[in-house]
Amino acid sequence: MIDCVIIDDEQHAIDLLKEHIGRVHFLRIVGTATNPVKGLEMIAEMKPGLVFLDVQMPNITGIEILKLISKDCHVIMTTAYKEYALDGFEHAAVDYLLKPIVFLRFLKAVNRIWIIHNNLREANDKDHYVFVKTEQKGKLLKIDSRRITYIEGLGNYVVIHMDDQRKITAYLKLKELTGHLSSMGFVRIHKSFIISLSHLTAVEGNMVRILDEPQPITIGEAYRKDFFELVNTKLLSLPPDPAIN
């Protein structure tokens, strides 16, 4: 369960978010505030896991509040103006929702928070960081493997797809990553693809769906047996009904 606080100077905007939150089983409202200063005090006292934060408010803006919030608290910005989204991302907001907020877009944003929340909870002391060589000579980039959705192999380099839509090019071969990442919840499903099981949302025949990716990824024939054996270990099924012949 993720505790949520809503800070917005418009009560109708709070009411809409409360309605959306009430439809999601892993979210719980612990406080709301139309006064941004009181909202900041509420965050400090309640230490919620998620804050829905309006950008434009009197006395103190959402961006100013964002700079003061602990990095342990995830923030989703809400705004009627798309141009403010970049400021939010620069200060570590996970996502932004454009008003009026529709439920499906809201659900997409909070599902991302849920994945991050679960990955962090399960991580404990395990090291989830990797370093990769980038296109810039002599530069190594540190990547949180929990935020990788899938990796695409393109010859002598790979494209690492992140959960914030970034694409990182690294000079590696896919086979060099397979063994290293398998202990971190990754599995190779194709000669050109490694996927994160944490970001896998569905298996459809011989294809998989990855969170936020519009196109499915095909499971290569050479990898199908091992992949479906893995899936079957997590498969929930009812015992046969003795009344049915």
Image (cartoon, helix red, strand yellow):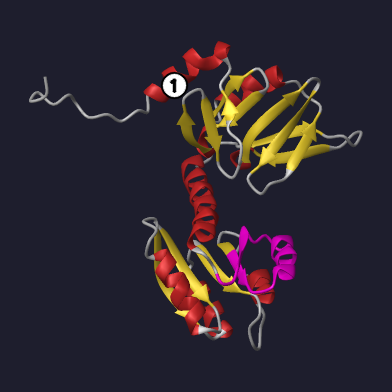
**Residue drawn at 56 percent across, 30 percent down:** 184
Q: Residue furthest top?
A: 222
Q: In the image, is residue 112 part of the stretch drawn in magenta?
A: no
Residue 11 drawn above or below residue 5? below
- Quadrant (top left, top right, bottom left, bottom right) of the C terminus: top left
Front residue of 197/3: it is 197
Residue 91 drawn above or below residue 206? below
Q: Which residues are magenta?
A: 76-100
Q: Residue furthest right?
A: 137
Residue 128 drawn above or below residue 176? below
Q: Residue furthest bottom?
A: 59
- Quadrant (top left, top right, bottom left, bottom right) of the N terminus: bottom left
Describe residue 130's horizontal placement relative to residue 76 as left or right. right
Place residue 218 in its image quadrant.
top right
| Percent coordinates x, y for residue 18 in the rendering | 42, 71
Front residue of 34/223: it is 223
Front residue of 87/42: it is 87
**Residue drawn at 47 percent across, 35 percent down:** 202
| Percent coordinates x, y for residue 142 in the rendering | 73, 40
| Percent coordinates x, y for residue 27 in the rendering | 41, 60
**Residue drawn at 55 percent across, 79 percent down:** 8
**Residue drawn at 75 percent across, 69 percent down:** 83
Pointer 1 residue: 230
Q: In the image, is residue 85 part of the stretch drawn in magenta?
A: yes
> Mark 1: which secondary structure?
helix
| Percent coordinates x, y for residue 36 in the rendering | 57, 82
Describe residue 147's horizontal placement relative to residue 173 as left or right. left
Place residue 222 in its image quadrant.
top right
